[in-house]
Amino acid sequence: MNISVVIPAFNESTVIAETIKKIKKYFKINNIVGEIIVVDDCSTDNTLAILKNISDIKVLKNLKNHGKGYSVRKGVLVASQDWILFMDADNSTDISELDKFRKYLADYDALIASRALVESNVVVKQNIIKVTLGRAGNLIIRLLIDPRIKDTQCGFKLFNKKVQALFNKITIKGFGFDFELVWLIKKNNLRIKEVPVTWVNNFTSSVKWWHYPKVLLEVLAVRINNLLGKYK
């Protein structure tokens, strides 16, 4: 298996080095040919300085803060391997969860991690506000994007070159890019599957409660874009 791992990073100085270390170790143990691409979204801490001291990775830098969707898209479009994974810098879904994906590679174009399946294991839960807002938002996302997918927002997704090409059509720069991607996969009749994972909440996450209503507006933007023919 050969794989590109794309990591969007904004002020991740406390976790990024350890996450990259774990990815490199996983590659070595599993004889994976891979590359690691980190996209720094104009961090204001010393994330970029740390990245410059880590060997054998590709670092891309945004000149201003654009958002997670913009950063993931930027990294994915330069990825060179047959399979591409994007994952969070805080390793909320550990790279070892990739083991659960590998048996499905021959049958699917996209495999997305899920915290919402019966077999999923959420080790550390989010606070009650985020949980409540997340559940409400998920109902709307499923209604307007794809009722088959129970969790579009987990930041751990693996896909092949067919899906990589769809990133040229991604318009959302923020957190809503995940369900825009799911919409595009569905629209292009590609094969997608949710895979249950173990997930650990990071309480220092940059995702704040006010991001949730913004994401819901982005759901409507996807449907409007579709009506306007922007995804053709």
Image (cartoon, rainbow, N blue to C red):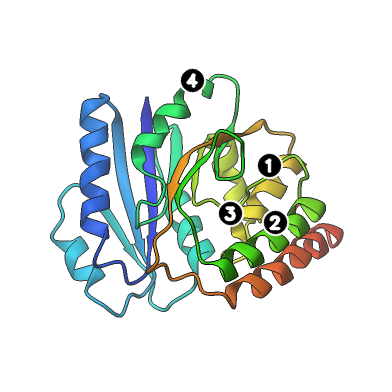
- Mark in front: 3 vs 2: 2
First in sequence: mark 4 vs mark 2? 4
Q: How far separated are the C-alphas under marks 4 and 3?
A: 22 Å
Q: Is residue 164 left or right of residue 140?
A: left
Hey, what amino acid is under mark 3? Gln
Is any part of residue 174 visible from this angle? no
Which structural element holds mark 4? helix
Q: Which mark is residue 185?
A: 1
Q: How far separated are the C-alphas under marks 2 and 1?
A: 18 Å
Q: Which quarter of the picture shows residue 60?
A: bottom left
Residue at the spot of label 2: 138
Residue 132 at x, y = what percent? 65, 65
Hey, what amino acid is under mark 1? Ile
First in sequence: mark 1 vs mark 3? 3
**154 vs 96: above or below:** below
Q: How far separated are the C-alphas under marks 3 and 2?
A: 9 Å
Q: Is residue 95 left or right of residue 100?
A: left
The reply to whether callout 4 and callout 1 are in contact (CB within 8 Å) is no
